[in-house]
Each structure stands twice: as structure tokens, then as C-alpha cells.
Image (spheres, rainbow, N blue to C red):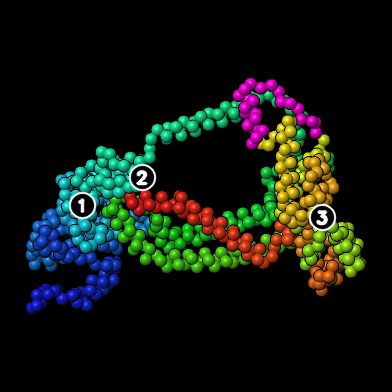
């Protein structure tokens, strides 16, 4: 509107705002989502006149672009505009020219959008062409930081780059923009030079001839690199030596290969008595190869694949049948500040326009996932129950006693429990296994058991190694150290003495009398049956024990008869329960350490370890990266 008597310009009237949109809707031309206006800015103490901006629309695209006038001059010069020029009508570009875009394609700009003028500041929008280039006399896009608007650029020669943005004084011919220096480790660029020079470096760097050099670099880096090279060469030589080393223990090699073969999963015996390997075509989701756990695990893998395909198909359908631009979101190229402004503007408009599709996608994905995972859970439960129904395993003959009091190992707890259960249920009991609280001695007892089993395996006495050259001898000694090979000169004896000493120290804290009885004995006596029995007698029972019956029916009958609980050794409320776990899955050392307080402590410790790991990752790995990116 024209100026009023007070010299001010009133806001546009309702008709001026509504009429263009009404006409656009009436004639089928998409109305612009926003109307951009240029305002006067103070440059050099003078207020420049308002520059008229030609609005260029494309009916086929339904988009709006802002093109600067052809007679615009460099900033700082006052502009005059005639009344005839002010009322010049908007140019409408109709038809399918080369700038026409369809849904799913990047906008290529409109007619006239690439006609850049030197020194004219213009604001880029989503319809601007990223491929536009400045004229040869002013070949660089400079971001105008002299106004209060954003995403405004002007074409300037290199010597005028710092006039528009003091931080971007370098003209980059390859990018066609004014940019700041690119120097690794630089904190502040040297704005007085038109080359990549730094004025101040970041911490850990020193400035030399405009370049930032790592402060702690020096000869020590060469020494470290040389050390790793030497280690790598030695490792290669070691591996080659093992490859060409002659076999001096054919019997041991064959025994190892046989043990390896025996650990492979095989099919049940065929008519000839052989157990062939499972074929690669075996369906592990239904075929019981290594227990129900493996079957359920591969069912989980398949369900995860189905769920991922389901989520992907939802997005594919929305992108294919609703709007093809969903394929482009997050994939368009970024680069210079001008290109980024165009990209952000386009992404903002498309995101707002298609937000309903994302909300719909989330609703479908969430509700679909909820239904699919409940279905999956039921299917997994039914699959396990089906496998358990069709196969009798050891757990089908066992019931677990819960609530057992803490009893000393010097009492015949197993025999007393067996007699008690038989008397109460009338069912024959094969035996009782008490879960003893031996977590503090787990490592030592496991080693003694392993040594006992190893001693029962018939093997030849250790033989002296063959003669070797000095290098191979050093490799051999290193292998004995890292692989724990037996030492013919008595290394095993010393290791056993050390382990037995640890047992005595721990036993003193639990049962000083038993530790005193074991002290002073030789290693052979200490690792014998009598000493281990003394150690066992010092232990106490956990609240659980396992009762083995002859048949599954007998087990179920006993559980039913004792459903109201029973008494043992003065403790009331002991119960007999069925099991869903097999004996080989039981962690025996953890019994006796499952109180609510201990569970809460373990849970807190688990979350604490995860939190510390995340903190370590954030400080050691992510923080340096984020600092470098934020200060680049």
C-alpha cells in the first residue's frame, strides 16, 4: 500500500492477502506457502531502497521462486524504482519446460532462477536451484552476514568476500563459494590472507607458517611404529614356524582330532549304526538338533527378519503410493552453505507436508509390532511345550525342593531328605542332589575336579621336546607360558601348591577348624579324597535341592501330594516344584546367593557397569569427535 499522511506504510489489506490465494485456487495454480519480502538494510550508514523482487511461479510445479531484478546493483548503492516498475505484473511461466519436476525428483529451479547478478543479495528457498553459478566477473557465492535475515547470498569477486562475511575470505573456485580456511587443528583462521592459513590453533597443536602441527609429535612416534613393525614381523615368523614345524606327537594330534570330531552335532544313528553330520538343508526352526533352546533361537532370528521386512514394506508402500518424495528425505546431497540452505528449506516444507504419513507409519509400525510380538511369544511357548511333550528328558524325572534350611555338610542331608520324601509320598526316590553353597570355593573346587578327571584319562607320560634351534626354542617356551602347557620340571606341582594355599586361606574365613585340620599336609595328601571331604563337610546347604524319581508319573504324584508343603529339620513350609530347566543348564555355584537383596545388588551392578561403559565410550571416543566437529 502507498504511504499514508503520517509517512508510514500500512500493512496489506485482507483483499491483498486473500485475493492471490483465491485466484490460485480458482485457476488451479498452487498458492505459495509463504510470501517473502525484502526490506531495507543499513549499509555504510545509508538506508538502501526496497528492491523489487520478481515472483516467478510455475503452474506445472506449483512452486514459487524469488528472482532478483535485472537492474539490481552492488550493495551500498541506493536504488530507485518507478511506479510503472512497481506495478509490473507477476510473470507466470506455464508449460513443461526443462525445469519441470515431478514428485520424487529434486527441484531443479525455475526459469530465470539461475540468472545471478553481481552484488545482489537474494534469499534462497526450496525452489532455488543448487546448480546455479555466479557470473565470471563475480564467481563466488558469499553468505551475507550484514543483514538480519538468514540464507541470503550474493555473487561477489574474491576481494569482496570478507565484506559480506569476514570469516569467509577465501574464494574457492572448485566450490564456487567464499569459505574460511581449511587447516587441521585450527581454532581461528587468519582472515587477512586469501589462502588456507591459521591464526590460532586448538589445544595440542602449535602454529607454524599458518599450519597447525601436532604438539606432541616427535621421534617417539617412529620408535613406537618401529616396535609394532618388529612385533608384527615376529608374529609372522612365529606363525610360519608353526606351519613348517614337524609333528613329533602323532598320537596326541590324533586324539585331539578325535575329540574335535566328537563335539560336532550329529544325527541319530541310522540302520548301519553310523551318526552322520546334519545336512546344510536342516531346518533349525523345527528340527531338534541341539535342544529346544537352539530351535527357539532360530525361530527368534526368523521372527526378527519377518518384523524388519514388515516395517520396510510399510515405508515402501507409503513412498510408492502416497508420495515419492519420501524416498528422497534424508538422502539429498549437501555441501556449501547455499546448498545446505536450499536443502533445509526443501526438507522443512516436505517434512511438514508429509508429517501425517510419518505419524501413520508410526501407528502402523507400533500396533503391528505389538500384535506380531505377542503372536511370536505365544508361538514360542507352544513350540517349547510341543518339544517338551514329545521328548522325555532328565528334568521330567526331577522335582526341586524349595525352602531348605542351612545345614552343615557333616550331616547326611541327602539320605535324610530321601527318606523324608519317600515317607511322605510313598514314591521310590532314586536319589537327592543338594545344591551346596560353594560359590567362594568354585574356582578351586572346579580345578580339583578337572584335575581328577584328567588323571583318569589314560595318557602317555609327558615326553621331552625334541631338539630345536634357538629361535624355535624361544617360541616353544612362549607357547608353554600362554597356552598353559605342562612343565616336566615341576611347574604343575607349584601351581597346585598355590591353588591349595588359596583354598586354605578362604577356608579359614568359613570354617577355621577344617582349615586347621588341612594345614600342614603335603600337596598329595591335601588334594586327596580325605582332604576334599573335609572341605565339603565345612560347607552349608543352599535353600534348594533336587529329588530324582523313577518315572515322570511318580514325580508328578509326589508334587501333588506335597503341594501344601512339609517340614524338615525344624523348618516349616518346604515345597516340591516341577522344573523347566535341564541339569546341564543349572549354575550350581550360584545357589545360596539369590535373596531379594542380592538380586537387587546384582541388578544395580549390571546397570552400573552398563552406565560406566557408556560413560567411558562417551568420554574416550565420542567427546573428542564432538569437540573436533563443534570447533572445526
Does dot 2 land on a helix, a strand or a loop?
loop
Q: Earlier in the sequence, mark 1 or mark 3?
A: 1
Determine the secondary structure under disc 3: helix
Measured in 3D between alpha carbons, the distance from the residue under mark 3 to the one under mark 2, in whole angstroms, is 63 Å
Q: Quadrant of residue 280?
A: top right
**Residue 177 visible here:** no
- Observer-side mark, 3 or 2, equals 3
Which of the pair 231/581 is nearer the observer? Answer: 231
* Residue at 50% over, 61% down: 314
Tell whether label 2 touches label 3 (CB within 8 Å): no
According to the picture, the residue beneath numbered tag 1 turns out to be 166
Judge left or right: residue 207 versus residue 312. Answer: left
Mark 3 surroundings: few (<14), some (14-19) or many (≥20) residues within 10 A: some
Magenta span: 459-482
Q: Is residue 274 left or right of residue 96?
A: right
Label 1: which secondary element: loop
Measured as percent of width and height from the top left, residue 600 is found at 63, 65
Tell me whether the residue at label 1 lies in contact with that at label 3, contact meaning CB atoms closer than 8 angstroms.
no
Residue 296 among those drawn in magenta: no
- Residue 620 position, x and y percent, is 46, 50
Residue at left offset 88%, top offset 62%:
416
Mark 1, other Cα within 10 Å: few <14 / some 14–19 / many ≥20: some
Q: Which residue is mark 2?
A: 204
Residue in front for this viewpoint, 58 or 156: 156
x, y percentage for residue 526?
Answer: 80, 44
The residue wearing badge 3 is: 537
Above-or-below relation of 390 to 27:
above
**N-term mark: 1 or 2:** 1
Amino acid at each position: 500500500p502507498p504511504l499514508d499522511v503520517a509517512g508510514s506504510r500500512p500493512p496489506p489489506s485482507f483483499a491483498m492477502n486473500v485475493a492471490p490465494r483465491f485466484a490460485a485456487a480458482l485457476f488451479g495454480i498452487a498458492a505459495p506457502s509463504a510470501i517473502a519480502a525484502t526490506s531495507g538494510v543499513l549499509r555504510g550508514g545509508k538506508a538502501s531502497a526496497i528492491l523489487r523482487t520478481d515472483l516467478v511461479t510455475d503452474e506445472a510445479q506449483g512452486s514459487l521462486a524469488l528472482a532478483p531484478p535485472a537492474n539490481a546493483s552492488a550493495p551500498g548503492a541506493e536504488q530507485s524504482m518507478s511506479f510503472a516498475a512497481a506495478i509490473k505484473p507477476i510473470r507466470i511461466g506455464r508449460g513443461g519446460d526443462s525445469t519441470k519436476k515431478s514428485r520424487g525428483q529434486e527441484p531443479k529451479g525455475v526459469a530465470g532462477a539461475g540468472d545471478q547478478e553481481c552484488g545482489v543479495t537474494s534469499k534462497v528457498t526450496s525452489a532455488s536451484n543448487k546448480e546455479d553459478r555466479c557470473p565470471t566477473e563475480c564467481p563466488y557465492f558469499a553468505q551475507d552476514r550484514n543483514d538480519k535475515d538468514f540464507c541470503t547470498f550474493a555473487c561477489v569477486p574474491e576481494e569482496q568476500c570478507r565484506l559480506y562475511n569476514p570469516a569467509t575470505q577465501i574464494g574457492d573456485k572448485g566450490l564456487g563459494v567464499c569459505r574460511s580456511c581449511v587447516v587441521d587443528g585450527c581454532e581461528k583462521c587468519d582472515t587477512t590472507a586469501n589462502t588456507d592459513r591459521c591464526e590460532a590453533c586448538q589445544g595440542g597443536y602449535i602454529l607454524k607458517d599458518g599450519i597447525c602441527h601436532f604438539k606432541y609429535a616427535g621421534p617417539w612416534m617412529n620408535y613406537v611404529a618401529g616396535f609394532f613393525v618388529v612385533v608384527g614381523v615376529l608374529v609372522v615368523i612365529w606363525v610360519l614356524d608353526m606351519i613348517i614345524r614337524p609333528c613329533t606327537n602323532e598320537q596326541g594330534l590324533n586324539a585331539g582330532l578325535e575329540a574335535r570330531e566328537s563335539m560336532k552335532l550329529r544325527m541319530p544313528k541310522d540302520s548301519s549304526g553310523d551318526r552322520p553330520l546334519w545336512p546344510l538343508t536342516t531346518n533349525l526352526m523345527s528340527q531338534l538338533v541341539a535342544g529346544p533352546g537352539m530351535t527357539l533361537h532360530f525361530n527368534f532370528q526368523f521372527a526378527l527378519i519377518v518384523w524388519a521386512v514388515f516395517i520396510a514394506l510399510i515405508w515402501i508402500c507409503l513412498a510408492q503410493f502416497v508420495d515419492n518424495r519420501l524416498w528422497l528425505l534424508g538422502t539429498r546431497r549437501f555441501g556449501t552453505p547455499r546448498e545446505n540452505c536450499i536443502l533445509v528449506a526443501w526438507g522443512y516444507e516436505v517434512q511438514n507436508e508429509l508429517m501425517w504419513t510419518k505419524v501413520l507409519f508410526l501407528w502402523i509400525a507400533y500396533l503391528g509390532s505389538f500384535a506380531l510380538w505377542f503372536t511370536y511369544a505365544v508361538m514360542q511357548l507352544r513350540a517349547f511345550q510341543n518339544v517338551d511333550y514329545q521328548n522325555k528328558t532328565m528334568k521330567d524325572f526331577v522335582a526341586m525342593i524349595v525352602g531348605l534350611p542351612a545345614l552343615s555338610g557333616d550331616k547326611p542331608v541327602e539320605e535324610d531328605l530321601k527318606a523324608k520324601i519317600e515317607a511322605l509320598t510313598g514314591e521310590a526316590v532314586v536319589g537327592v542332589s543338594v545344591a551346596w553353597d560353594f560359590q567362594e570355593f568354585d574356582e578351586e573346587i572346579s580345578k580339583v575336579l578337572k584335575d581328577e578327571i584328567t588323571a583318569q584319562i589314560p595318557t602317555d607320560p609327558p615326553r621331552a621336546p625334541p631338539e630345536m634351534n634357538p629361535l624355535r626354542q624361544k617360541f616353544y617356551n612362549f607357547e608353554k607360558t600362554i597356552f598353559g602347557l605342562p612343565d616336566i620340571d615341576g611347574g604343575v606341582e607349584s601351581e597346585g601348591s598355590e591353588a591349595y594355599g588359596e583354598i586354605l586361606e578362604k577356608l579359614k574365613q568359613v570354617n577355621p577348624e577344617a582349615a586347621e585340620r588341612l594345614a600342614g599336609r603335603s600337596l598329595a595328601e591335601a588334594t586327596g579324597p580325605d582332604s576334599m571331604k573335609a572341605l565339603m563337610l565345612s560347607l552349608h546347604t543352599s535353600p534348594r535341592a533336587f529329588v530324582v524319581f523313577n518315572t515322570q508319573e511318580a514325580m508328578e504324584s509326589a508334587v501333588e501330594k506335597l503341594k501344601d508343603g512339609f517340614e524338615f529339620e525344624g523348618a516349616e513350609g518346604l515345597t516340591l516344584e516341577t522344573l523347566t530347566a535341564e541339569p546341564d543348564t543349572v549354575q550350581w555355584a550360584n545357589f545360596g546367593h539369590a535373596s531379594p537383596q542380592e538380586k537387587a545388588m546384582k541388578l544395580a551392578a549390571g546397570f552400573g557397569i552398563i552406565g560406566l561403559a557408556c560413560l567411558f565410550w562417551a568420554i574416550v571416543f565420542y567427546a573428542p569427535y564432538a569437540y573436533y566437529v563443534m570447533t572445526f
